[in-house]
Each structure stands twice: as structure tokens, then as C-alpha cells.
Image (tube, helix red, strand yellow):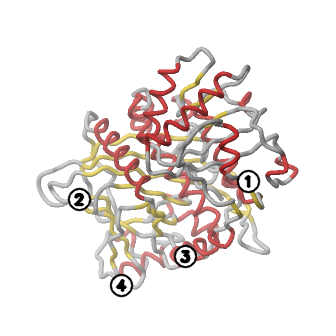
């Protein structure tokens, strides 16, 4: 399955035979082509891409989408070159998707991301796609380049099984799993985090919610939401009011998306978070149809310097299905059931199982964690809270004779704190093995 990457999408009639690929009949298209441009020379990649895009623009009745900009036949060549150059400065892998007939469904550039994600799920059905450099040459006659494409793309079932096993092993022990980034993806994410942090700096301070150990911290925060992985960010108060987050920070998030730089940064981070959520969802047995029904809320936080004792976010498991975290500094601490405290690195997307996953699957332990912030600590984090559709009955796909699970996120979050709740046994183990002294509400013994 292809991971989600920032992409350039191009529609065109390409000189390829339909026999170049094998796709399930249910998902038949005129052409589906996945290209990866891996040359380290940005200028060379840009030059080749510019030639390709310029040719596409000259063809009648074709629409070109480039890095969320619509290109038409009237677009000046200089504008094309400029936008391509900007794209290649920030995007290391360009995937060109061509599927005539699909483009009528796009009402805005955000929808491209969803289509890419749908195709990434379907890519597991692709048995073999034979792409050669001669095909590229046929599209860019006379070009001289050093761009290389991957070897023929085959199903990555074996590789996914190995990663899925690692995720399952970690989650069954109540541990986190880190989805790694490559070096170029890391650079993009670091820049996006800096840009997001710059915007958050202008917001008002607020205190975090009081944790189990009464710990709080000053922070600047807002959140965004989408109806699911690959869906665009929601842009109305009515829509975000349906989520379980505080409305004030949600409205602040709506305002933040009006800032172009912040919106682009949020999209970049959303792509990385969504990709990790897809990988992890498949590993824990959430099928692709159910994944598409799950909602996502993305909270962006800038922890700010404060006087006095160290603050932070108190010990807890997230009351969600899955959490995906990107942060640019230390402070996250994971509390294993055996009494070990670990400090995950922050060079990857940190995945954690939530209490909803524990209730639904009954085999994955939620990840108990806290965040420690020293007096002069400044860092930015964004966490995606992934949830089943609320107030709906969800099938338990991991059980052969499974009953159904009714998802009520507010009840789950309240029950997480109760001494007689479903997590009480786990809390007892954590408190005992870590020799903690927490408020009586969490002591069931």
C-alpha cells in the first residue's frame, strides 16, 4: 500500500496501453499511473517536470492541478515554472495520478488528498504495475535527464505484515509504536512545525486540562477536524461543534486555516498523521471500509515557558481509538505495565492505542502516558485523535463470534476516570508498579 505523500496530480490522456496494469474490475480506470521521482537533483527534477506539465497544458480540455493550484491553458509558462520550483523545494516525492473521468468530482484542491488516499487503499489490489523509463521518454520527447523511477511496483503485503506484527506486539503490551520518516520527509515536517508554531505564538495562553495528578501547563492551542482520513479540514462552526473538543479552540482553528502558510503547514502534517493512522488501523484489524467512516480531530499545541514547578499533561491514556503524535521536542513519557518509564524519540509519528481500542478489540492495552514540561521548555506538538463515528454501533471485526460495540465517546472518557470503570484494573497495575500516589478517584483497590 502506498503511503500518503504530498503530491502533484495531473490529468491527461497518456500514451499507455491498458495492459500495463492489473486492477480489480470493480476499480477499473482508463489509466492509473504511480510515478516516484527520486533524483536528488532538485533542478533536474524540476526541469523534467516542467516539460511534462507544459505539454499537458497545451492539450485541449485538460486540467492540471499542481500543489493545490489549478493550472489552465491560459496559465503563463513563467507561473508554471515558479510553482513547480516552489513545489520541488518542499516536496521530495512527487506522485503523478492520472485517471480521466475522476476529476469531475473535485470541487476544491483538498479533495485531491482524499482521492490519493482512496487509491492508496486500493493499491493493495494492484498485482503488478510495469513502469519503465521509456514511458517517461514518450511523454517528454527530446528530454535528457537523470531521473530514475522505482522498480516495478508490486504488492507490499509481506512488508506490511512485518510492520503490522510490530504494531500489534507494541499495542498488546501498552507501548507506543513510532512510524519513521525518511530524511526528506523529516525536513518538510520540521519546517511545517516551525510555521505552525509561529502562528500559535500569536494566540492567547490557556491552562491545559487538569490531569490525574493535578498537573497543568500553560499552552497556546487550537484544533482542526475532518470527517475522516483524506477528507479536507472542516470549515464551518456547525461541523466542528459536533466533535468532542472545546469549541473555543475549534473556532480558533477555523480562523487559523484562513492563513495560507498555516493551512499549508497543517495539510503537510495532516498527510503524515493520516498515513500513520492508515498503517496502524490496518494493523489492529480496522478494515478499510470502517477506516473511511472514522473521524479525526487534530490538536495543535505550543507549550510555553512558565515560572515555578515543572508542569505538563497528567498521566492518562487517550480516550480515543488511536492517537498519532508529531512533536519537535522531548517530554513524552510512556508508563509500561511492568513499571518501566520510557521516553520515545520524536523523529517519527508516534502512534498510541486509546481506551476505545481497548474496549472494542479487547486485546490491545491503551498507552498510559504523560507530558513533562520544564520551566523554560518551548515545543510544538500536533496530535490526531482518531475515532469511530460517534453514537453508532460498530462491528467487532477482530472476533470470530463478536458482538457489536456501541461507541459513545463522552461516556468512554468519563468511564476512564472511574474507580469502577473498565480501566480500573489497568490503573491499579500502573499505580502499583510505578509506585504512584494519585487521587482516590483512580484507586479501586
Residues at discs 4 and 3 in contact (Cβ within 8 Å): no
Q: CA distance from mark 2 to mark 3?
A: 30 Å
Q: Secondary structure at mark 3?
A: helix
x 48%, y 57%: residue:
324
Closest to the observer: 19 or 166? 19
Q: Of the residues under marks 1 and 4, which one precedes in the sequence?
A: 1
Q: Secondary structure at mark 1?
A: helix
Q: Residue furthest left?
A: 308
Q: Of the residues under marks 4 and 3, which one precedes in the sequence?
A: 3
Q: Secondary structure at mark 4?
A: helix
Foreground mark, 1 or 2, reads 1
Foreground mark, 3 or 1, reads 1
Mark 4 neighbour density, 10 Å: few (under 14) some (14–19) many (20 or more)? some
Q: CA distance from mark 1 to mark 4?
A: 44 Å
Q: Of the residues under marks 1 and 2, which one precedes in the sequence?
A: 1
Q: CA distance from mark 3 to mark 1?
A: 23 Å
Residue that badge 1 annotates: 122
Is residue 193 left or right of 150 when viewed as pictured?
A: left
Residue that badge 4 annotates: 433
Task: Name the quarter where the N terminus is drawn.
Answer: bottom right
Residues at discs 3 and 1 in contact (Cβ within 8 Å): no
Foreground mark, 1 or 4, reads 1
Q: CA distance from mark 4 to mark 2?
A: 23 Å
Residue that badge 3 annotates: 166
Residue that badge 2 annotates: 373
Foreground mark, 4 or 2, reads 2
x 71%, y 66%: residue:
396
Q: Which mark is residue 416?
A: none
Q: Residue furthest top?
A: 74
Q: Is residue 173 above or below residue 99?
A: below
Q: CA distance from mark 1 to mark 2?
A: 42 Å
Mark 1 neighbour density, 10 Å: few (under 14) some (14–19) many (20 or more)? some
Amino acid at each position: 500500500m502506498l503511503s500518503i505523500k504530498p503530491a502533484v496530480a495531473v490529468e491527461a490522456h497518456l500514451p499507455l496501453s491498458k495492459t500495463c496494469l492489473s486492477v480489480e474490475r470493480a476499480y477499473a480506470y482508463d489509466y492509473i499511473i504511480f510515478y516516484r521521482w527520486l533524483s536528488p537533483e532538485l533542478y533536474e527534477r524540476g526541469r523534467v517536470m516542467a516539460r511534462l506539465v507544459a505539454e499537458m497544458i497545451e492539450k485541449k480540455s485538460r486540467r492540471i492541478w499542481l500543489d493545490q493550484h489549478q493550472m489552465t491553458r491560459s496559465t503563463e509558462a513563467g507561473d508554471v515554472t515558479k510553482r513547480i520550483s516552489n513545489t520541488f523545494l518542499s516536496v521530495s516525492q512527487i506522485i503523478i495520478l492520472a485517471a480521466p473521468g475522476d476529476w469531475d468530482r473535485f470541487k476544491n484542491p483538498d479533495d485531491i488528498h482524499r482521492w490519493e488516499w482512496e487509491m492508496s487503499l486500493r493499491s493493495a489490489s494492484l498485482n503488478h504495475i510495469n513502469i519503465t523509463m521509456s514511458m517517461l521518454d514518450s511523454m517528454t520527447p527530446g528530454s535528457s535527464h537523470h531521473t530514475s523511477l522505482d522498480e516495478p511496483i508490486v504488492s507490499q503485503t509481506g512488508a506490511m505484515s512485518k510492520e503490522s506484527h510490530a504494531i500489534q506486539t507494541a499495542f498488546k503490551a501498552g507501548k507506543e509504536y513510532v512510524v519513521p520518516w525518511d530524511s526528506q520527509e523529516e525536513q518538510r515536517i520540521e519546517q511545517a512545525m516551525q510555521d505552525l508554531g509561529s502562528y500559535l505564538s500569536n494566540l492567547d495562553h490557556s491552562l491545559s486540562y487538569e490531569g490525574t495528578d493535578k498537573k497543568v501547563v500553560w499552552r497556546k492551542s487550537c484544533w482542526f477536524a475532518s470527517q475522516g482520513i483524506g477528507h479536507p479540514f472542516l470549515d464551518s462552526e456547525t461541523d466542528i461543534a459536533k466533535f468532542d473538543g472545546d469549541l473555543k479552540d475549534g473556532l480558533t482553528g477555523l480562523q487559523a486555516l484562513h492563513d495560507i502558510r498555516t493551512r499549508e503547514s497543517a495539510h503537510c502534517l495532516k498527510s503524515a498523521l493520516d498515513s500513520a493512522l492508515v498503517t496502524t488501523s490496518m494493523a489492529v484489524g480496522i478494515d478499510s471500509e470502517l477506516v473511511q467512516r472514522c473521524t479525526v480531530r487534530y490538536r495543535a499545541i505550543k507549550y510555553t515557558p512558565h515560572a515555578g514547578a515543572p508542569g505538563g499533561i497528567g498521566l492518562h491514556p487517550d480516550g480515543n481509538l488511536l492517537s498519532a503524535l508529531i512533536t519537535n521536542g522531548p517530554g513524552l513519557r510512556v508508563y509500561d505495565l511492568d513499571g518501566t518509564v520510557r521516553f520515545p524519540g520524536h523523529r517519527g509519528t508516534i502512534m498510541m492505542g486509546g481506551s476505545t481500542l481497548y474496549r472494542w478489540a479487547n486485546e490491545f492495552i491503551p498507552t498510559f502516558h504523560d507530558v513533562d514540561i520544564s520551566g523554560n521548555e518551548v515545543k510544538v506538538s500536533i496530535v490526531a485523535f482518531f475515532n469511530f463515528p460517534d453514537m453508532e454501533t460498530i462491528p467487532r471485526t477482530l472476533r470470530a463470534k463478536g458482538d457489536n460495540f456501541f461507541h459513545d465517546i463522552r461516556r468512554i472518557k468519563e468511564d476512564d476516570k472511574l474507580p469502577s470503570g473498565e480501566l480500573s484494573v489497568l490503573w491499579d497495575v500502573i499505580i502499583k508498579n510505578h509506585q504512584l500516589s494519585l487521587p482516590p478517584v483512580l484507586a479501586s483497590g
